[in-house]
Image (tube, helix red, strand yellow):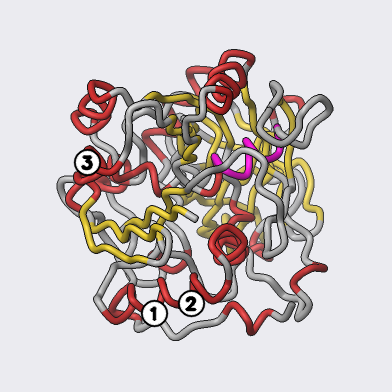
Amino acid sequence: MKLDDFDFELPEGLIATRPARPRDAARLLLAEGDAIHDRHVRDLIDIFRPGDRLVLNNTKVIPARLAGTRTRQSAQGEVVAKVEVTLLEPAPGGEWSALAKPLRKVKEGEEIVFSDALSARVEAIENGQLRLSFNLSGDDFDVALAEAGAMPLPPYIAALRAPDDEDKRDYQTVFARHSGAVAAPTASLHFTRELLEALAAKGVEFTEVTLHVGAGTFLPVKVEDVTTHKMHAEWGEVSEQAAAEINATKQAGGRVIPVGTTALRLIESAARAEGGAKGHIVPFRDATDIFIYPGFEFRITDALMTNFHLPKSTLLMLVSALMGQDRIREIYDHAVKTGYRFFSYGDASLLIP
């Protein structure tokens, strides 16, 4: 299975740099069986059925991109350099792993100042990453980070424009609860509170899980044989209540539909933990590096709502595993030809095998 098997031509003009407004005005490509229908996200009220269960990732994106300065003393006086830091994930003991740009501008033991309230000491530099200890913790850290930080937009958006205050609202789901992600579960960005309420009134049920999406989600696949690719690990949790709800839906013959690849990867991981099985998941609280590509056996997922993904990406491999490579090729050809908007702020698809 070669990397080129997952390539396609995408015009740059189809890369969305802002979301649709309102959120549920985004287009929705419904692929069910052999058919393709052009709809809108708001039409989900007519598509989902009573007894369907949507699995939502309630992770909350932190404003992980920080602009700071570090100061050194030299024979000529103080030398100040600008440093951009992107937080990756919390480490044991309250420290954070992070990327710095340019990395050569910082050394171990130095302080990087981000605002009057927020600064961090570089405790170590290992494998191109910083280990930072901040001057604040808990709620004080959250408040200072919210003021000093910017949303960590994906590279393909950041290359086209800088993040701004609108992104602090746009790049967050309406049901975000648990801070820790540095990328959004983007399929969920299409939901408004009104749409969720309308779906609930119809009899659609919801289960929340948590997977803190890491920056590794944007890492390219660098091996030609994709089956040898090593996935990054991300921390996730399926609570006892969430597992019970999903199992009850499966037992009743309802459909379990994760919203986004992150929710899908998490529930499929929980179905593979000790005690899990086809049609049955167990509570799960751990890191997962599950890699889903064609040939994968789905144990829980009946359908998937997701955005349109990068060529040669692990996420394109995942949807190819769900729908089949030829079928995904047809779907993406249609999306490109009819002008669907791609990637994190783009349109959505509902994939029903």
Determine whether the residue tagged by mark 2 lies in a helix, strand or loop: helix
Q: Quadrant of residue 245?
A: top right
Dominant secondary structure (helix, strand or loop) of the stretch shown in magenta: helix
In the image, 319 versus 159, the foreground residue is 319
- Residue 302 percent across, percent down from the top left: 52, 43
The numbered mark, 1 or 3, whose residue comes first in the sequence reads: 3
Return the residue at label 3: 46
Disc 3 + disc 2, Cβ < 8 Å:
no
Give the number of callouts: 3
Q: Is residue 19 above or below residue 51?
A: below
Q: Which residues are magenta?
A: 263-270
Badge 3 marks a residue whose secondary structure is helix
**Helix or strand or loop: what does disc 1 sit on?**
helix
- Which residue does the numbered mark 1 point to in the structure image? 333
Task: Give the residue type at disc 3.
Answer: Asp
Q: Are marks 1 and 2 in contact (CB under 8 Å)?
A: yes
Nearer the observer, 88 or 210 = 210
Report the residue marked by disc 2.
329
Q: Residues within 10 Å of mark 2 (few under 14, many from 20)?
A: some
* Residue located at (33% from left, 27% from top): 50
Q: Is residue 353 above or below residue 170?
A: below
Compared to residue 48, the image places residue 231 above or below, namely below
Q: How far from the left and from the top, in percent, is residue 171?
A: 35, 45
Position of 2 with respect to 71 (left or right) is right
Q: Is residue 83 magenta?
A: no
Q: CA distance from mark 1 to mark 3?
A: 25 Å
